[in-house]
Image: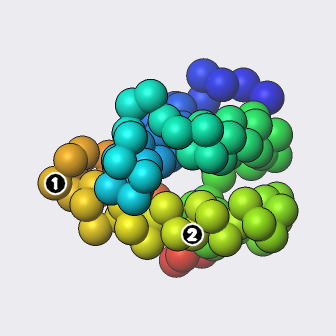
Amino acid sequence: MNRDVPRVARERKTLRFMIEIYCKGIHHQGVPLCRDCEELHDYAMARLDECPFQEEKPTCKDCAVHCYQEDYSDRIKSVMRFSGPRMIYRHPVLAVRHLIDGGIAGAN
């Protein structure tokens, strides 16, 4: 799939920052990521590469196609629960865009 699609590129960036925040806060690492967080990041990026929706991609929670394996799904949910509230302070523009993307996708 096309990595240059703006919606997907933004989601890549958002996921990377969320995983970094989580890794720093929970594993006390951040950049570079610990092995577990790097593996999760690589898995999430691979899933984005394969997303059939691309520019029309909803947020994962609102998607009809659940492409994450259960273990990875649980891990990314933990990352988002921890990092979501912190994103507004660390990366406010991405945080607001992520909320808007979720709001728009949830309205359909």
Q: Quote the CA–CA distance across marks 1 and 2.
A: 20 Å
Q: Is 70 placed left or right of 22 in the picture?
A: right
Q: Quadrant of the C terminus?
A: bottom right
Residues under numbered marks 1 and 2 in contact, where contact means CB atoms less than 8 Å apart:
no
- The amino acid marked with disc number 1 is Tyr
Most foreground residue, 108 or 85 = 85
Q: What residue did someone put label 1 on?
A: 89
Q: Secondary structure at mark 2?
A: helix
In the rendered image of this protein, does residue 20 appear above or below residue 66? Answer: above
Most foreground residue, 88 or 101 = 88
Percent coordinates x, y for residue 100 in the rendering: 37, 61
In the rendered image of this protein, does residue 6 appear above or below residue 11? Answer: above
At a point 73% along the width and 43% down the height, the residue shown is 43
- The amino acid marked with disc number 2 is Lys
At a point 73% along the width and 60% down the height, the residue shown is 72
Q: What residue did someone put label 2 on?
A: 77
Q: Quadrant of the N terminus?
A: top right
Percent coordinates x, y for residue 24 in the rendering: 35, 47
Location of residue 22 by image quarter: bottom left
Question: Can residue 42 be seen from the camera position used here?
Answer: yes
